[in-house]
Amino acid sequence: MKLNDALRIKTAKRIAAMQEAENRRNELHARIARVKEIDSILRDIPMRSLVGESVEALRAESEALNAERARLLEACGYEADYDTPKFECKECNDGGYCGLKLCQCIKSMLASGNYQESTLAQGLIGKTFENLSLDYYAEGEERENMAKIIDGCKRFAQSFPADKAAGLYFYGGTGLGKTHLSAAIANVVSQKGFSVLYESAQQIADTLEAVRYNRADVSERKKYESCSLLIIDDLGAEFFTQYGSAAISSIVDLRIVNGKKTIISSNYDPNGIKKTYGERLCSRILGEYRVLKFVGKDIRMQKIKGANN
Ligand SMILES: [Zn+2]
């Protein structure tokens, strides 16, 4: 692994930890009005010292507020550090550097070489079951559908590879949590020590094509066959080369025969990919996979709108 990759992974973790802390703070603010009030007073304290208030008095006030905050949290069943970012490395807070020196955590990532997460695409780190929010799904059927899907996926991941289904097929519109959920499963399964490969259908088709023309080593193909969990993202109805589509189908097929699990996500229901990938793949998926339909409104769009309000 290269230094840049290691730093990127760390930074992604740092951002995820801070995002998670912010979500938790918002949750506290929604549940305990006084905590929201306290946080807004605490936020203004540094400014008040600039306009001449006594530093000692401000420090005492801030200590009292923090103590009150901790008591409130405890009374409501939260740990006092509930909304403090939980960084993986306490030395560098996942920044990668201690002062000007590279942190030990980065050095050991570089040394371990085959760092598991290097197989996971960058955007997946930090996507967990815990920070998958149901708030973006309309109350009622939509949310119940999603809660059921999440439950099933959690069981799939936690019991990996025991699940009876050969794989999961996620389908539905863009921005409904398919990628987040695949990533959450990938994180759990790889933490259990299994090898996980997460790539888009396009990447896989390109690689298989490259192997075919000897532009890539045959081991590049083998990794799709041998990893414990293969996640094929964004299986579209677009036309790769005929070879690419056929090669993906045959990998999926081979994995079923060998009892290896696969997760496929797509904007299309299994019948919608028949034309590109063939009848066989479609009936394999319908017969052997658990097919899960995602419904709702594009979460990314909702977040963008929410941020603008
Ligand atoms: Zn560190």
Image: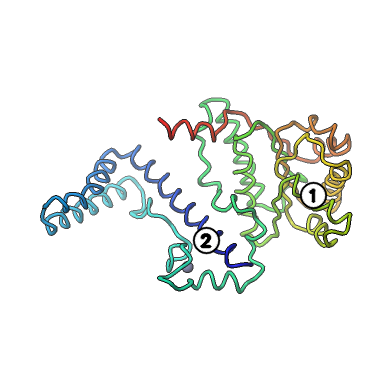
Residue most extreme to the top: 140
What residue is shown with label 2? 10
Residue at x 60%, y 71% (from the top left corner): 110
Residue 206 numbered tag: 1
Whether pointer 2 and pointer 1 mark residues with C-beta atoms closer than 8 Å, the reply is no
| Colour option used | rainbow
Query: Secondary structure under badge 1?
Result: helix
| Percent of width and height locating residue 230 | 74, 51
Q: Is residue 129 above or below residue 287?
A: below
| Percent of width and height locating residue 246 | 88, 43
Instruction: Using a 10 Å C-alpha cutoff, classify the residue at mark 1 as few (fewer than 14 neighbours), some (14 to 19) or many (20 or more).
Output: some
Please state which of residues 61 and 188 is positioned toward the viewer in this rendering: 61
Q: Is residue 277 left or right of residue 88?
A: right
Query: Secondary structure under badge 2?
Result: helix
| Percent of width and height locating residue 291 | 73, 36
Please state which of residues 283 and 245 is positioned toward the viewer in this rendering: 245
